[in-house]
Amino acid sequence: MSPQLEQKFFELVGYMVTSARNLLDETPLYGPFRLVDAVSRLVGILEEEGISSPRLSSLRERIEAGKYSVADDPEGFRCFLEGLVQAVVEFLVAGRGW
Amino acid sequence: MEVWEAIRGRRSVRSFQDRPVERGLLERLVEAAIWAPSGGNAQTWHFVVVTDPEQLQRVKTVSPGMLGDPPAAIAVCQDMNEARRKGGELGAKFLAPVDAAMATQNILLAAHDLGLGTCVIASFHKGAVARILGLPEGVEPVLLVSVGWPARVPPPPPRKKDVISWERYGNEPST
């Protein structure tokens, strides 16, 4: 692993570890938000490294488009997460995405 | 910009252009901060401005609430020892964070007036940020503010309107 890639993964790990600690004291809705945001960051790192697939990119785009509903629309955030799972399921039943 | 326009127009920006913020503008934001009210005029605040990309990345790594890639951040800190000395427990437990919040609001409005976008961040690990910023014992980060040129400004979120009572809680205004 290159030092640059190791740094990116280290920062992601730092984000996830700090999130885990902070979520003990934060609003419960931030838990799912941090999870899907971590997914987006992970896929982003893979894309920067030239490792990408249409279905991963599609999921990341969906996350980026909908994740901020957590701040002002809890029901919309719930629907966004539900839609995300449905998208995963559709990819699963359709077979490999590349 | 009119004050009312700034109050109504400010948004929490989480998407920034890849463009630095000039030092003079950041100094102006801190100048705005120190004109905020301060309980007992204690002014026990301190502001650490971070623009170095590596230092910013360190802070971001332990700040899950810092979203997007801002080119600058301001750590709004309080000297809790001094706050306690000047204002007792009320000073340390209540006035210090309230003062930090009022200073932060000045930063947000001044930034909006300059065309800058900001986002207030409470979701960070205090001890980790203090270590990274080299804060002395007793000086604590209360809030972080990400600062940058907006790439995308979100629409205004709905505001809760039924928040006013007259004379007693729950009363409508007398006609």
Image: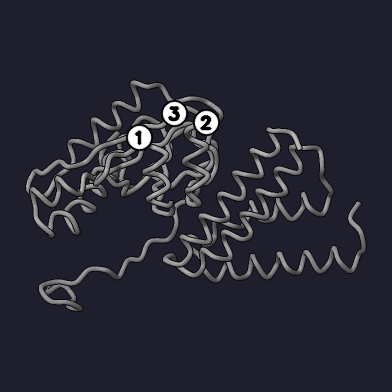
For label 2, count other residues whose C-alpha is less than 10 Å away and answer few (under 14), some (14-19) or many (20+): few
Q: Of the residues shown, which amino acid type is indicated by label 2?
A: Glu
Q: Residue B126: percent from the left, percent from the top?
A: 38, 51
* Residue receiving disc 1: B111
Residue hosting label 3: B51
Quadrant including the N terminus of chain B: top left
Cβ atoms at labels 2 and 3 below 8 Å apart: no
- Type of amino acid at the residue the image marks with label 1: Ala
Pointer 2 and pointer 1: residues touching (CB < 8 Å)? no
What chain letter is assigned to the residue under label 2? B
Residue B160 locus on image (x, y percent): 35, 66
Residue B45 x/y as whole percent: 21, 41
Alpha carbons under labels 2 and 1: distance apart: 23 Å
Label 1 resides on the chain identified as: B
Q: Is residue B46 left or right of residue B156?
A: left
Residue B106 position by quadrant = top left
How many callouts does the rendering have?
3
Say which label, 2 or 1, has the lower sequence index: 2
In front: mark 2 or mark 3?
Answer: 2
- Three-letter amino acid code of the residue under disc 3: Thr
Q: Residue at x 48, y 35 (%)?
A: B56
User: Viewed as shown, does residue B71 lie left or right of A58?
Assistant: left
Give the percent coordinates (x, y) of residue B78: 24, 45
Contact, mark 1 vs mark 3 (Cβ under 8 Å): no
Task: Please give the residue where the numbered disc 2 appears in the rendered image.
Answer: B54
